[in-house]
């Protein structure tokens, strides 16, 4: 998930295969001991624990464990007891300090400080992407949806955890860490606004926020290369590749819901974005990457003219 560090529109190949992805191995840390043998009682239970976890190590480890069990076909969607109610707010460690977007200090640019500030901002976006994706998995587990819907979004949740782990490690390589700088708390508003509206969640998260990452990530990759930072460029390339798929999943399932409701996808998308998204859809747009993912200009360009 990318895109909100410009406080405009965030921050989740165009291929849409749903085969089991390879899990990403993060560094072992003491905080994982509590969940070393964790297997959730259901997919919804695992999703809830991901979102509720305050420990970053636990959050990412539970995401991996839940995805592994789900793709191993050893989990039900949810328990019949209804005990998997999703938390109102995601669990967070004591740092970073979370501020309203308007109160965020101006970010450093240039040099190591600027690189750390940018990576920290993107890491915060990706952490929110972990919670937003797993919240959607757990929150809508009681809906009558094809199993492949959950296959797709569990894969996205796993990849968002991978992105956060890569960025967190890169910050440590630069003698910093996630939590060293303040971050804004506006991203979770999308979850609050679309808590009972799956179409709205798909419109705002993958088709606005993730799609914004397709616009802004290629220039960031080039800038990292120009500044002699191939490690950061390689991480951003992974994120960009995965986010094309995330947008494609969003477009696929948004169209699926519109087909069921017998409504026009473009008009429905525009109505939902006006209702649930605060801010403008700001050009320039990466029309080619968006279209390859199934998000054609007819969806978003009218909103840029009306809102931006």
Image (spheres, rainbow, N blue to C red):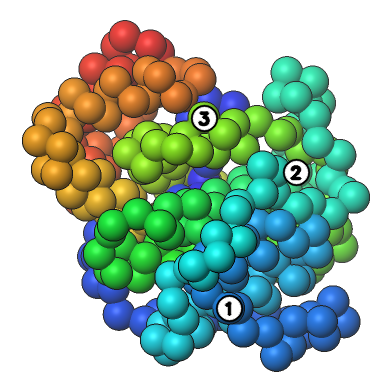
Q: Depth-wise, is mark 3 or mark 1 nearer the camera?
A: 1
Residue 134, given in percent of the width and then of the height, sits at: 53, 58
Disc 3 to disc 2, how far (Cα)? 29 Å
Tell me the quadrant of the picture where the C terminus can be found. Answer: top left
Please say if the residues under marks 1 and 2 sit with CB atoms less than 8 Å apart. Answer: no
Residue linked to disc 2? 117
Relative to residue 41, is residue 168 drawn left or right?
A: right
Residue linked to disc 3? 193
User: Badge 1 local density, few (<14 within 10 Å), some, or many (20+)?
Assistant: some
Q: Earlier in the sequence, mark 3 or mark 1?
A: 1
Residue linked to disc 1? 41
Residue 250, given in percent of the width and then of the height, sits at: 31, 49
Q: Determine the secondary structure under disc 2.
A: helix
Q: Is residue 103 above or below residue 147?
A: above
Relative to residue 158, is residue 104 drawn left or right?
A: right
Q: Determine the secondary structure under disc 1.
A: loop
Where on the picture, by quarter, is residue 207?
A: top left
Q: Residue at x 25, y 51 (%)?
A: 253
Residue 180, given in percent of the width and then of the height, sits at: 87, 49
Q: Depth-wise, is mark 3 or mark 2 nearer the camera?
A: 3
Q: Determine the secondary structure under disc 3.
A: helix
Q: Residue at x 37, y 42 (%)?
A: 198
């Amino acid at each position: 998930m990318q895109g909100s560090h410009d406080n405009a529109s965030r921050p989740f190949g165009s291929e849409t295969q749903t085969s089991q992805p390879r899990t990403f191995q993060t560094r072992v840390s003491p905080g994982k001991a509590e969940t070393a043998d964790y297997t959730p009682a259901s997919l919804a239970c695992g999703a809830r624990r991901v979102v509720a976890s305050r420990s970053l190590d636990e959050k990412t480890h539970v995401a991996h464990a839940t995805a592994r069990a789900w793709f191993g076909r050893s989990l039900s969607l949810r328990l019949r007891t209804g005990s998997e109610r999703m938390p109102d707010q995601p669990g967070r460690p004591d740092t970073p300090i979370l501020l309203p977007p308007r109160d965020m200090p101006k970010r450093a640019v240039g040099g190591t400080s600027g690189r750390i500030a940018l990576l920290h901002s993107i890491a915060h976006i990706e952490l929110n992407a972990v919670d937003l994706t797993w919240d959607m998995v757990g929150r809508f587990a009681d809906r009558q949806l094809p199993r492949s819907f959950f296959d797709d979004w569990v894969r996205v949740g796993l990849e968002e955890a991978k992105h956060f782990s890569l960025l967190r490690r890169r910050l440590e390589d630069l003698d910093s860490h996630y939590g060293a700088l303040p971050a804004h708390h506006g991203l979770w508003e999308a979850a609050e606004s679309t808590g009972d509206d799956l179409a709205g969640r798909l419109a705002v998260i993958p088709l606005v926020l993730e799609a914004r990452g397709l616009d802004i990530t290629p220039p960031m990759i080039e800038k990292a290369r120009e500044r002699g930072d191939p490690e950061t460029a390689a991480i951003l390339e992974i994120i960009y590749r995965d986010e094309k798929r995330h947008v494609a999943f969003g477009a696929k399932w948004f169209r699926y819901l519109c087909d069921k409701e017998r409504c026009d996808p473009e008009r429905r998308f525009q109505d939902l974005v006006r209702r649930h998204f605060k801010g403008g859809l700001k050009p320039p747009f990466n029309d080619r990457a968006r279209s390859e993912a199934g998000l054609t200009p007819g969806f978003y360009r009218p909103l840029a003219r009306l809102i931006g």
